[in-house]
Image (tube, grey):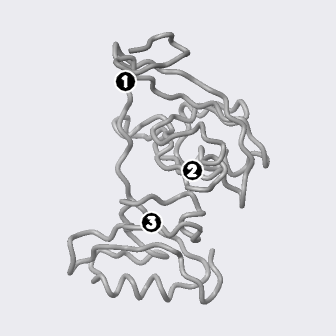
């Protein structure tokens, strides 16, 4: 949602006359698009308010985004996060983090989730932590971390939309269970008691 006369605060590259499919090339810090916590740099924009962008030139896409009304619905395509594998050089650790919402978000973008095509199913992964947002200020959560639960609600087996809904519907304060990778080789981790 945006007010009349304001911009979304995102830069788009590409178009049929440019280097391929339209994609988000920049998100202005503090802008509407960044604060939505649903977009990431590199995301492909397939449609704006139901209008498919496949045959649009770059200037037409920019014009469409500038003149779009107050309600903006972007259809986005993105690459799935890689699957992290626990092995001899990586071990998984979990940590509980309590965050307070700001503008109904915690300041991070999630991707992944269950999918009917098992090859597309992923854990719910945090792909971006918005600078200056609640998660960034708290300092524990990093891109690549996996979100296992929100206030005790396990996200295993939930779709991306369901996980987003759980995050939106939880209270102003929530306890998140985060799983992260610890590299065993050549890194010091006081919890593991290994140092180089």
Closer to the chain start, of discs 1 and 3, is: 3
Q: Earlier in the sequence, mark 2 or mark 3?
A: 3
Q: Secondary structure at mark 2?
A: strand
Disc sitting over residue 21 in the figure: none
User: Mark 1 Cα within 10 Å, few/some/many (few <14, many 20+)?
Assistant: few
Q: Residues within 10 Å of mark 2 (few under 14, many from 20)?
A: many
The residue at which mark 1 appears reads as 85
Residue linked to disc 3:
75
| Circle nearer the viewer, 2 or 3 | 2
Q: Quadrant of residue 82?
A: top left
Is disc 1 placed on a helix, strand or loop?
loop
Q: Nearer the viewer, mark 1 or mark 3?
A: 1
Q: Position of residue 172 (x, y in %)?
A: 79, 49
Observer-nearest of 140 and 159: 140
**Residue holding disc 2:** 108
Q: Disc 2, disc 1: CB below 8 Å?
A: no
| Residue drawn at x 39%, y 83% as measured from the top left | 62
């Amino acid at each position: 949602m945006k007010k009349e006369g304001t911009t979304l605060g995102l830069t788009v590259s590409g178009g049929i006359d440019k280097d391929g499919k339209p994609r988000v090339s920049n998100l202005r810090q503090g802008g509407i698009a960044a604060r939505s916590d649903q977009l990431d740099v590199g995301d492909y924009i397939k449609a704006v308010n139901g209008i498919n962008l496949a045959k649009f030139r770059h200037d037409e896409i920019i014009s469409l985004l500038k003149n779009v009304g107050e309600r903006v619905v972007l259809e986005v395509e993105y690459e799935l996060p890689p699957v992290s594998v626990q092995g001899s050089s990586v071990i998984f650790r979990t940590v509980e983090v309590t965050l307070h919402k700001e503008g109904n978000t915690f300041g991070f973008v999630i991707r992944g989730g269950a999918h009917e095509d098992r090859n597309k199913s992923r854990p719910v992964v945090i792909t971006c932590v918005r600078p200056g947002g609640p998660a960034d200020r708290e300092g524990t959560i990093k891109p690549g971390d996996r979100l296992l639960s929100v206030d005790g609600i396990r996200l295993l087996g939930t779709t991306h939309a369901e996980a987003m809904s759980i995050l939106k519907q939880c209270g102003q304060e929530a306890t998140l269970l985060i799983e992260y990778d610890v590299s065993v080789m050549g890194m010091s981790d006081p919890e593991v008691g290994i140092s180089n």
